[in-house]
C-alpha cells in the first residue's frame, strides 16, 4: 500500500504531507491518537485545510486507501500461473513483514471506522481486478481451462496468507507464500 | 464460538454470567464500552470478584476464547473430504451470519487487546487441530495421498471464507463455503 509521492502543486503536496502524517500517527501511536488536529499538527498543513478537505478520521483513512489505489501496481508476469501467484503472495508477506507495518495498521483501523472498512474493501477489490490478468494469461497459454473465476483463484491463493498474517498475526512458516499459491494453482 | 452453559457451583455460574455480559456489551456497545465495571454491573457479579478473577478487559476477552475452546465441538464426518470441508465452512459462514455476530465482535476486539489476540490465535489453532481428523480420515479412505499437511488443507479451505467475511466483511456470494472447500480439496 505504498504511496507515490507526486510532483505537483500545493494541493498534491498537502495531500502527501497529510497522508504521511496519518500513517506515521497510526504506526507510532495507534488509532486512538489519530485525530484531525493531530494530523494537521504533524503534517504542518493548516487545520482548516485538513478539516475542509478530509472532514474527519474516516475521510483521512479512506483517502489513504484511495491514494494506495492510484499507484501503477501490476501483478508479476513470470510466464507461469503458479509463479505469478507465488510472487503476488510474496508481496503480501513483505507488506506485513515491514516493521511497523502500514498494511496491518490500516487493517486494524478498518475495524474502527466504517469509512476505512469500505475503502479497504475497494482497495482489495481493485487489486483482485488487476490480478485477474495472471489467470487470463494462464488460460491463454493453455495452462488452465478457460473460464476459471479469476477472482476466486486469486483469493484462494492470497487469503490463507492474509489469514495467517492479518488475523492469526503469525508467526507463520517461511514458506506460506509458496505453499498456498501452489495449493490454489494445483486445483485448477 | 458458542459457549456451553455448565451446571455447577457459584464459580461456574459467575463465569457464565460474566462472559455473557462481555459478549452482550461487545455486541450492543462495542469495545470502548467494555470495562470491568460495566461487566460487573451487567452480570450482577460483585466487582471485586470480577477484578480478582479476570483482572482487566484483556483477561475477560481471553477467558471468552478459552471458554469457547472448552466446548465439545468436533468436525463433521460426512464420509468425504470435500463434504467435510464444505460443512466446516458452512459453520464459519453461519457464525458470521448471526446478527449481531459474536465471532466478528471478538475478532474486532483482538485488534484492541494483545490478550484477546493471543487467545483468538489459540482458539483457532485448537480448532485446526480438531479439524485435522477430516484430512487423516480422507487419507485412510485413500481419497488423498497420505502425508498431506492437515492444517494447511484446513486453512486453504477456510481462510478464503474468513477473508471474505472477517476482512472484506462481505457481501460474499452464497456459494463461498462450497467454492473454496472444493478448490482446497481438488488440489490434493
Image (spheres, coloured by chain):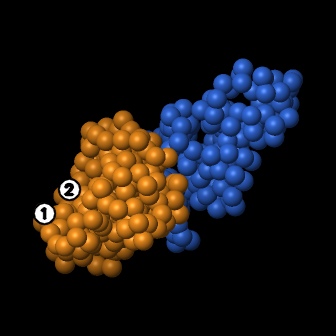
Chain colours: A blue, B orange
Q: Is residue A33 visible?
A: yes
Residue B57, image x and y in percent? Answer: 47, 60
Judged left or right of residue B156, residue B70 is: left
Residue name at image x 22 percent, y 66 percent: B13
Residue name at image x 26 percent, y 62 percent: B16
Q: Quadrant of residue B140?
A: bottom left
Residue name at image x 68 percent, y 26 percent: A54
Where does the N terminus of chain B fall, quadrant-wise? bottom left
Q: Check disc 1 and report the residue beneath it.
A: B78
Residue B85, image x and y in percent? Answer: 25, 59
Residue B59, image x and y in percent? Answer: 44, 66
Q: Residues within 10 Å of mark 2 (few under 14, many from 20)?
A: some
Judged left or right of residue B149, residue B93 is: left
Question: Which numbered circle lies on residue B87?
Answer: 2
Query: Residue B4 versus residue A187: which sits nearer the camera?
Result: B4
Judged left or right of residue A128, residue A31 is: right
Residue A39, image x and y in percent? Answer: 75, 37
Q: Quadrant of residue B132?
A: bottom left
Q: Is residue A136 above or below residue B34?
A: above
Amino acid at each position: 500500500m505504498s504511496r507515490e509521492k507526486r510532483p505537483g502543486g500545493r494541493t498534491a503536496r498537502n495531500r502527501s504531507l497529510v497522508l504521511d502524517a496519518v500513517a506515521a500517527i497510526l504506526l507510532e501511536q495507534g488509532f486512538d491518537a489519530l485525530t484531525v488536529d493531530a494530523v494537521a499538527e504533524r503534517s504542518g498543513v493548516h487545520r482548516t485545510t485538513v478539516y475542509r478537505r478530509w472532514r474527519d478520521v474516516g475521510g483521512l483513512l479512506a483517502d489513504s486507501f484511495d491514494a494506495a489505489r492510484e499507484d501503477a501496481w501490476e501483478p508479476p508476469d513470470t510466464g507461469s500461473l503458479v509463479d505469478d501467484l507465488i510472487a503476488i503472495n510474496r508481496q503480501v508477506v513483505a507488506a506485513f513483514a515491514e516493521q511497523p507495518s502500514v498494511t496491518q495498521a490500516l487493517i486494524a483501523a478498518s475495524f474502527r471506522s466504517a469509512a476505512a472498512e469500505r475503502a479497504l474493501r475497494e482497495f482489495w477489490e481493485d487489486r483482485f481486478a488487476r490480478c485477474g490478468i495472471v489467470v487470463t494469461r494462464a488460460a491463454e497459454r493453455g495452462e488452465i481451462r478457460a473460464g476459471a473465476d479469476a477472482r476466486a483463484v486469486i483469493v484462494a491463493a492470497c487469503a490463507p496468507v492474509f489469514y495467517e498474517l492479518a488475523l492469526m498475526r503469525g508467526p507463520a512458516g517461511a514458506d506460506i507464500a509458496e505453499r498456498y499459491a501452489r495449493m490454489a494453482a494445483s486445483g485448477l
